Structures are given as C-alpha cells and as structure tokens.
Image: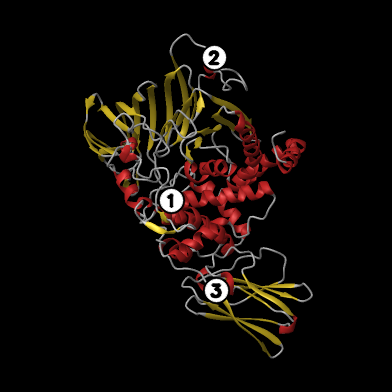
C-alpha cells in the first residue's frame, strides 16, 4: 500500500474494511446475474477443440527452439476435412516477407508534415525497414520438420507463414485425430511482439512461436498470412514443458505445475529460484480452454504477485532494475484494486491466474498473460482487458479488429475512470482520434480486413478509436443502464464462442428492446459521419421553438438540453424512427419525449413553454457521447 497514490490507498482501505461484506456481495451479485441471464442461453454454434502437449527446448547460445507436439484435434464441424493448415508466424521475420514488403511500402506514404515541416510517414515504428536488414543469424523462422497422422507421414507445402498439410485420411465430422509433429524455430531479433534482446534488455519474448493450428469455423479455414495485425485460434488445452538454461527465469501462459521444484515466487511469495545441478531446467505450464500460449525468459527477471478479491492470482514479472521497482509495485496494487470493478462491469475472469510480463515491443495480449514494455498502468490495464474482449470472446481479429481493440479500449477507459474517480461519459481521447480520422480523408469502413487497410493510421484509429466510440455511443442510443446490462449479457452468451458483429447487436437489441441493425450498418460498413446543428430559434406564440438540422449523412436519435436563467434544465429527446423504441432517461432532469425523427428528414422542431428570454443555453448532446464531427454548431449560448 505504501506505493499507492492517496486515492488508491483510500479505495484499498475501503476494500480492507469492507472485505468480508464485499466478497459476500459480489458472490451474491454473480448468483443473481446468472439467474437473471438464464433466458439468454448460449447460442448453438459449434467450436473446434484442440489439445497441445508440447516439449520445447531453447538453446540460448544459438537462439534455436526445438520442439515436439502431440496435437489432439476434434472436428466438431459438420464438414469433412481433407487438409489442415498451420500458422508459421516467425517466417514473417525474413527479408522480403510480406510483412517486410508491406511495412516498407507504407513507410513511403506521407500523411502530412510535423511541426518542423518534416514528412510524417505511415511506418509501423516497431518494424519500419528492420526486417529487410536482418542477417541469417538474426532473422526468424518456424519449420515443421515432420508431421504424421495415425503413424503416416503427411505431405506439406509452405505458403510463407502458412503450412498446408494434405491428409491421407479425411477428418470426419464429430471425430478426433492425433497429429505428431517436430519443429524448429529461430528466435529473431526483437521486431514485432516476438524476439530477443529488446530495447528494454529483455532477452527472450516468445510469442506466436509454435506451429499453431489454423481455426476452422462456420466461414471455413481462416488461413491468414502474418502480415501485420492480429490473431485467431482454436479453443483448447495446453500442457507445455519449456526447457531452458537453468539461470533463466520464465513467465508464461497458464499455471506452473512444478512450482515446488522451481520456487522463484511460484511456490510462495519472495522465494528464490531453486538451485539445480543440471545445466537446463524444465518449467511445466498448463492452461485450459484458451487459444494461445506465450512465454518470456530473462536472467534478471523479478517476480511479485497480487491476489484479487474473488478473482485470479496476478503475476508481475519484470526486469529487476531499482529505478522501476516502485512503478511495478504500484501497478500491481492498482490492478488488484481494479479487478472487482472489472468483474462487476464486464464479467468475472474465469481462469485462475494472469501474468503481466515485461517483454515485446509495446503491449500485446495473450491467453492468461500479456507482454508489456513497461509498468505503464494504461497499457497494463488495456492488455488485461483483452482477456475479456479477445481471449474470452475469441473474436476473429482479422475480420473484426474493432470488436477486440475497440471494446478493450472502452473497458480500459471505464476502468481508469473508476480508479481516478472521474466521469467516464465525457468525451475521451478515442472520440478525438475517430473525429480526426473522419476528417482526414483516409478513413475506410471498419469492415475492412485488418491486414488490408490502406494505411496503418487508418487501421489504428478505426480499430481502437472508432471501435471504442461504437460502444460508448451505444450507451447514448440505448441508455447507460441498458449498456451495462448488454455488456454482461454479451459476456454470458458469447464467451468461448467467437462472436461476430451481428451476434453482439442481437444481444444489444434483445436487452434494450431497441432495433439497432441500422447502427451497425452505418457505423461498421460505411464512413458516413454524424453532424447535427442548432439551426434557428424563435418565438411561436407563447412557446420558444428550436429547429435542429441534420448536416451529416448518418442519422441518430438526439438529446437536447435547454438551460434557463434560474438554473433549471429541460431535456428534450427525439428517438430515431429506425430504432422502433426509445431509451430510458439517464438522469432525473425533466424530459420531454418527441415523436420519432424520420431518418430521411433533415430538420426537426422542438419547443419549450418558456420564453426565449429565459433561455441561457441550448445544447445537443450535453454528455458528449454523440460522435458529432463538428461540435461548434451543437451549442447556442444566449447573453441577455
């Protein structure tokens, strides 16, 4: 607690004082929640299942990983599979790979000038042209040396980062087969999430490292090349034995199964790494019902833990440098403090542990773990929130990156606001990011495949900023209380199910009683923008009339707040006719509900019974949740 801010200490003290009652309350909350969601049964969508049993050994002198896999694969689809596909991600870290070519191409695209007049280029700063300069001993690769099924060797063909495997016998529906593989990987210099010898001095960040089965779903095989972006995987269980030089310390996905033989804080807080006589040490990790596995290793890592209230054990594994010790301690305290709010708002974390591991080149989420560059609280919370909006939902990130990054950004912002005791409904940075994109001329529909955006800039602001606005603005459309119910119903219905945009919208519609297909169609599949204005004000008999104007091409329901000289306020609410319903009031201010605004109509008139001279201001969307691209015409202030 000594490393917490005063605000965090107050919250932590509150938890200490009320711990018993709080634990009972949150337990009862989830019982009631489960009961109330019983009518929202899990959708009937089949999922493939996989079991990885892996033995992998890292030679720190050659940076080579050699491994064997026993892959047990269950085909729960109605289809007969005559071939399978496997990801070989590290083949991207070779000169003239698709990732290299794409990065260098975008690096020639000028977005404008900086304040010094220098061109701003569309580089991914983590990659730039570094892959093209890698020497053979510095690049990365992943080779499947052999793969067999029922004792028969299978024929393969490498398509850069995808391995095509032709089967001698088809995999029938509802059947299970076993593949035996051996593989070899070379750890590249740190380039993109994975690698060795990062700028922060982390020796090994081992992500996207093993031959990973491509997901087969209702759309078929998702054999996406590793060009830049995100990932998609099969739900399954991992039992992984990692053998590495005995002086290295390891953090990874899952729960360490041989903690008593390892020590180093895995058996009990603050314990040392147990000495051994052999040159190599094996770490045994197990994870259930996840779709990826990451690990990292360094000789000077430090390991601390935090237990959350009714939640997971949190591991923090970081470079042991005195100058950052206090930051990691504070971040650990704050994450543990935040968990009850996260669980209450987005749903309980279902796995027993989560590891925050310093590594990679920024922040990147994986099952039960993340690689983060530093102790930045914002990055740490963001990556942890991916446990809900990627690891738990398992959305296809290549097709719907905004459902991952955008929803996660929204969760991060709400959690941060709660920690800082500030409103989370005010216009946030992600609104500004979206509006800047919308005005830039570079925007593309959010339905664009994540690897096929024309610009890194367009992808980032669409996936993160516009995706987060999608969720926050939904609260504007259906009401904040309804949005909170939607979040928990989405969690209850679609965890472990790979939801798509329509799946989320149907949950939102059923929960709110409002039709929302129009919102999805406009926001996801077009780049049309929202712009409403206060057009004119006049007296109509004894009433003041206000005409509103739709300037932009995207229609929305409209909130207008009128403030009077005596300090009183009135809310005027106009539903959109495509909603076929209306939202409840968000506050206790008197509200007048109008007939629906036809989406094709450009103007609408509202009225107040008070005279113009009593009005001090009229404002469209005083909560700033409407993503209006020009708010200069949203407010009229009267000086009498």
Please determine whether, in this image, residue 582 is positioned above or below residue 348. below
Q: Secondary structure at mark 3?
A: strand
What's the residue at 59%, 32% (across, down)?
A: 314
Please determine whether, in this image, residue 132 is positioned above or below residue 248. below
Cα distance in 3D space between marks 3 and 2: 66 Å
Residue 532, numbered label: 3
First in residue order: circle 2 vs circle 1: 2
Q: Secondary structure at mark 1?
A: helix
Question: Residue 228, how many percent across, how many down?
Answer: 37, 45
Q: Are marks 3 and 2 in contact (CB under 8 Å)?
A: no
Question: Residue 416, how many percent across, how many down?
Answer: 62, 48
Work out which residue is located at the far bottom of the displayed protein and give it: 541
Cα distance in 3D space between marks 2 and 1: 42 Å
Give the left or right position of residue 150, taking residue 253 as reference: left
Work out which residue is located at the far right of the displayed protein and give it: 566
How packed is label 1: few (under 14 Cα within 10 Å), some, or many (20 or more)? many
Q: Nearer the viewer, residue 498 or 384?
A: 384
Q: Are marks 1 and 3 in contact (CB under 8 Å)?
A: no
What's the residue at 46%, 49% (across, down)?
A: 43
Cα distance in 3D space between marks 1 and 3: 29 Å
Residue under label 1, please give it: 401
Give the left or right position of residue 167, taking residue 244 as reference: left
Q: Which-is-in-front pick, marks 2 and 1?
A: 2
Residue under label 2, please give it: 274
What's the residue at 43%, 60% (across, down)?
A: 524
């Amino acid at each position: 607690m000594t490393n917490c801010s005063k605000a965090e200490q107050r919250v932590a003290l509150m938890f200490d004082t009320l711990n018993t009652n709080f634990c009972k309350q949150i337990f009862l909350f989830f019982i009631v929640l489960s009961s109330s969601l019983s009518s929202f049964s899990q959708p009937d969508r089949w999922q493939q299942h996989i079991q990885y049993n892996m033995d992998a050994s890292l030679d720190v002198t050659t940076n080579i990983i050699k491994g064997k896999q026993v892959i047990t694969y269950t085909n729960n689809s109605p289809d007969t599979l005559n071939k399978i596909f496997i990801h070989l991600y590290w083949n991207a870290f070779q000169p003239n790979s698709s990732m290299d070519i794409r990065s260098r191409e975008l690096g020639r695209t000028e977005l404008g000038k900086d304040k010094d007049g220098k061109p701003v280029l569309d580089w991914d700063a983590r990659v730039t042209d570094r892959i093209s300069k890698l020497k053979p001993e510095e690049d990365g690769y992943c080779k499947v040396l052999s793969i067999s099924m029922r004792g028969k060797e299978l024929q393969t063909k490498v398509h850069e980062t995808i391995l095509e495997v032709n089967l001698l016998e088809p995999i029938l529906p509802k059947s299970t087969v076993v593949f035996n593989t051996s593989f070899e990987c070379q750890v590249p210099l740190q380039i993109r999430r994975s690698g060795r010898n990062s700028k922060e001095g982390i020796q090994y960040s081992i992500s996207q490292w093993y031959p990973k089965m491509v997901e087969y779903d209702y759309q078929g095989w998702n054999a996406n090349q590793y060009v830049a972006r995100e990932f998609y995987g099969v739900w399954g269980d991992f039992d992984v034995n990692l053998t590495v030089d005995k002086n290295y310390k390891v953090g990874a996905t899952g729960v360490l199964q041989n903690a008593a033989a390892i020590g180093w804080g895995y058996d009990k807080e603050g314990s040392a790494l147990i000495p051994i006589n052999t040159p190599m040490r094996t770490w045994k990790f197990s994870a259930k019902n996840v779709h990826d596995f990451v690990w990292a290793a360094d000789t000077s890592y430090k390991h601390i833990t935090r237990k959350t209230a009714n939640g997971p054990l949190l591991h923090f594994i970081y470079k042991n440098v005195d100058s950052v010790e206090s930051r990691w301690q504070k971040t650990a305290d704050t994450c543990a403090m935040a968990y009850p709010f996260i669980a209450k708002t987005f749903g309980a974390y279902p796995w027993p542990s989560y590891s925050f591991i310093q590594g990679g080149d920024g922040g990147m989420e994986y099952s039960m773990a993340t690689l983060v560059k530093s102790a930045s609280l914002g990055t740490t919370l963001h990556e942890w929130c991916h446990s809900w909006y990627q690891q738990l939902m398992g959305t296809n990130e290549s097709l719907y990156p905004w459902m991952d990054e955008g929803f996660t950004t929204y969760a991060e912002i709400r959690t941060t606001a709660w920690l800082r005791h500030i409103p989370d409904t005010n216009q946030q940075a992600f609104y500004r990011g979206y509006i800047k994109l919308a005005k830039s001329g570079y925007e593309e529909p959010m339905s664009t495949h994540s690897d096929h955006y024309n610009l890194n800039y367009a992808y980032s602001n669409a996936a993160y900023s516009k995706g987060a606005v999608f969720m926050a603005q939904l609260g504007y459309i259906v009401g904040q209380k309804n949005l909170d119910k939607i979040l928990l119903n989405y969690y209850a219905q679609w965890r472990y199910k790979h939801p798509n945009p329509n799946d989320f919208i149907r949950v939102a519609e059923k929960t709110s009683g409002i039709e929302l297909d129009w919102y999805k169609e406009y926001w996801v599949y077009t780049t049309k923008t929202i712009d409403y204005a206060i057009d004119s004000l006049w007296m109509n008999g004894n009433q003041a009339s206000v005409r509103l104007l739709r300037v932009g091409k995207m229609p929305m329901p409209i909130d207008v707040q009128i403030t009077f000289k005596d300090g009183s306020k009135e809310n005027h609410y106009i539903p959109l006719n495509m909603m076929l319903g209306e939202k409840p009031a968000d506050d206790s201010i008197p509200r007048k509900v109008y007939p629906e605004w036809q989406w094709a109509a450009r103007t609408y008139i509202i009225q107040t019974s008070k005279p113009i001279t009593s009005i001090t201001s009229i404002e469209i969307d005083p909560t700033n949740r409407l993503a209006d691209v020009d708010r200069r015409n949203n407010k009229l202030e009267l000086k009498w």
